[in-house]
Every structure is written in structure tokens, then in C-alpha cells.
Image (cartoon, rainbow, N blue to C red):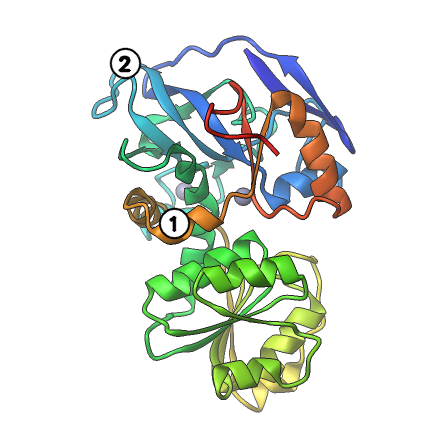
Amino acid sequence: MRVLVWNGPWDLTIGSREDPEPGPGDVLITVAATGICGSDVHGFTGENGRRKPGQVMGHETVGHVAAVGAGVEGLRPGDVVTVNPLIACGRCAACAAGAEQSCQDRRVIGVNAEIVSAFAETLLAPASNVMVLPETMPLEYGALVEPLSVGYHAARRGGCSAADAVLVVGGGPIGQACVLAARRSGATHVVVSEPNPHRRALAGSLGAVAVDPGSDGAVTDALGGRATLVLDAVGSTASIEAAAASSGFGARIVLVGMNAPRIDLPAYAVSTEERTLIGSFCYSAQDFRETAEWVGRAPGVLEHLVDGRVDMAGAAEAFTALAAGTSGKSKVLVFPHGLPAEVDGR
Ligand SMILES: [Zn+2]
Ligand SMILES: [Zn+2]
């Protein structure tokens, strides 16, 4: 089968791998589309040291079941499926608590170099990580379940409810997922601060009020006060400062963005005004399942999220443009078997 191989910084080529065979408990999936994640882009440039040369990345995927291994029930060839890429051990304390994202023995499709992942014509995944989606849903929505689950988990970690005035810092794909999750959780006041005008327009179409962080007082004006919950989808010193400055005493600040491994914290904003800083990483199996169910209902708002589509031959160019910041695209999908007929490409 054909795959996209990451050879090293800024070097992605089409290669080939043996056609995988499903072993006991495995599902073989014909990949229809796989999204390019920010973490893949950082892997591509080499900034993210977790990717290894020779690796096949890709973890935001949708496809059809091609075959199942022995012992697999409830999945049939032809089923539309997405894959929860987080493979947890199922035996540790974190797994028992339903916090698979904290499993110390987890392996992640698209991250662990030994797993040939979803930028490929086919993907092998454990049946327990494969989720059936309705055939009536636009197929490519299935590739959005994974990034949307990240936002959903962040909103749940923050205890988001209808009572909250929510600020989302950053309007990239994770910020967009946070907006949709906050709206799903009943929040009606959702503001996004994002410097890029395209991303602001997109956030607006998702039901948020989008403001430019450069303009003074814009966030509090849009919220009609201070945020009670901040979802920081950036994760930098500047974003955590903005989160503190725009939120009221006692606010919860969820750190989901991973821009930098170390940041400066406005400590007194946490201590003297009793804000709570909450970490959020990936999603639990339940978050993923609930998000897959929501995506399966094909809420109309999802039509705004995918704005770029390429085949294998166009993937290197798409990665390069995303990494160089010249793309202007937010979520680009790679179609390993070629672009669907109704899509005109870039
Ligand atoms: Zn991702
Ligand atoms: Zn575990």
C-alpha cells in the first residue's frame, strides 16, 4: 500500500509498506480521509521530537471497514468508521477510572513510530478503538471526531455549563473544537480571541463572537463582563496572561493548548483571586464516543471546518504551507485514494 513517509524535517514523500493483515481483535480500515493536525505539522518540521524519521503519521481519520480479524463482533466490511487513536492498556488505575488519556502504557496511533498510521491507504486498529458512524453523515466529518474530542474534553474538564461566560483563547482547530464543545455544553456567551481574521470569521460561523486580542477591552465588551471559564487553546505565557486578565475572580482556566513546554504564570492572579488552573490532555474513551455520536448526527455547523483537501501527491505541499504559515487553511484532509469526485481539490 501507499503511505506518506516522514523522512526528517520538512521532508515528506510517498512510500510503500506491506499491506497489513488483521490479527485477532483487529480491524482493517480502508482510509478515506485523514486530517492534518497541528501536532503532525510540528512533527513534520521536527519541532515535535516525538516523531521519528521513517514514520507514517496520521491520527484523525475516517474510512470503511475492509476486513475484521478473529473474534471481532459488531463491525462489518463496508461500515463507516473512525478510530480513537489512543490505545490504553485497560488494566491500570487511570484506565479503571475512565481516564485513558492518563494511562502510562498508552500507545497513540499517529504518534508512536512503530505504528503505521492513517496517512496510508489502509490502517489497522484494535476493534475496541473503532467507532461506527452513520452512512448518512458526510463522510469527511468522521475525520473531525478526534480533534473535536480534544475540545470536548477541555470543556468537560472546565465543568462548562449554560451558566458560563466562556472565553476561548486561540481560534485554530483546537480553539474551534472548544467553541463547539462550549456551545454543546449549553454556553450561550462564547467569545474567541484570535489575531487571524480568517480564523475569526470561522469562529463566528461556529456561534462564537470573535475578537482581535490586539484591541483593548474587546473581550470584556463582547462578554459583557469577565469570563467565568477560559479554555486556553494556545498554551503560551501570553495566552495564560490573557486568560487571567479577561476572567473574573474564582474563574476556571483550562490549559489545553501546548504551544510551549514552559510558560510564565501570573501567580497572583491564581492565588489572590482564587482562579483554578486545570490541565486537559486528549480525551477519555467516553469523550471520544460521545463526540463520535454528536458528529454522527451531522450538525450543520460542521460544514465550516474542513477548508482544504489534497491527495497523497499534494500532501507534502500542504504540510509545507501549513508549517510555513502561508497556507491560510485551517483543517486540511488528505485523501489517500484520491479526492472524491465532488471535491475540486485546493
Ligand atoms: Zn490531532
Ligand atoms: Zn492503562
Query: Gap between marks 1 and 2, in whole Å?
Result: 26 Å
Judging by the rendered image, the residue that carries numbered circle 1 is 284
Residue 88 visible from this viewpoint: no
Q: Residue at x 34, y 49 (%)?
A: 291
Ligand 2: image quarter: top left
Residue 51 position (above or below residue 69)? below
Q: Tell me if the residue at label 1 has its CB under 8 Å from ligand 2.
A: no
Q: Which residue lies furthest to the bottom in this view?
A: 272
Residue 270 at what x, y percent from top left? 58, 82
Looking at the rendered image, the quarter that the N terminus falls into is top right
Residue 233 position (above or below residue 270)? above
Residue 171 at what x, y percent from top left? 58, 60
Residue 50 position (above or below residue 217)? above
Q: Alpha-carbon neighbours of circle 1 within 10 Å: few (<14), some, or many (≥20)?
A: many
- Asked whether the residues under the numbered discs 1 and 2 touch, taking CB atoms below 8 Å apart as contact, a structural biologist would say no
Between 26 and 179, which is closer to the camera in this rendering? 179
Assign a secondary structure to mark 1: loop
Judging by the rendered image, the residue that carries numbered circle 2 is 70
Residue 259 at what x, y percent from top left? 67, 57
Which tag, 1 or 2, sits closer to the chain's start? 2
Q: Which mark is residue 123?
A: none
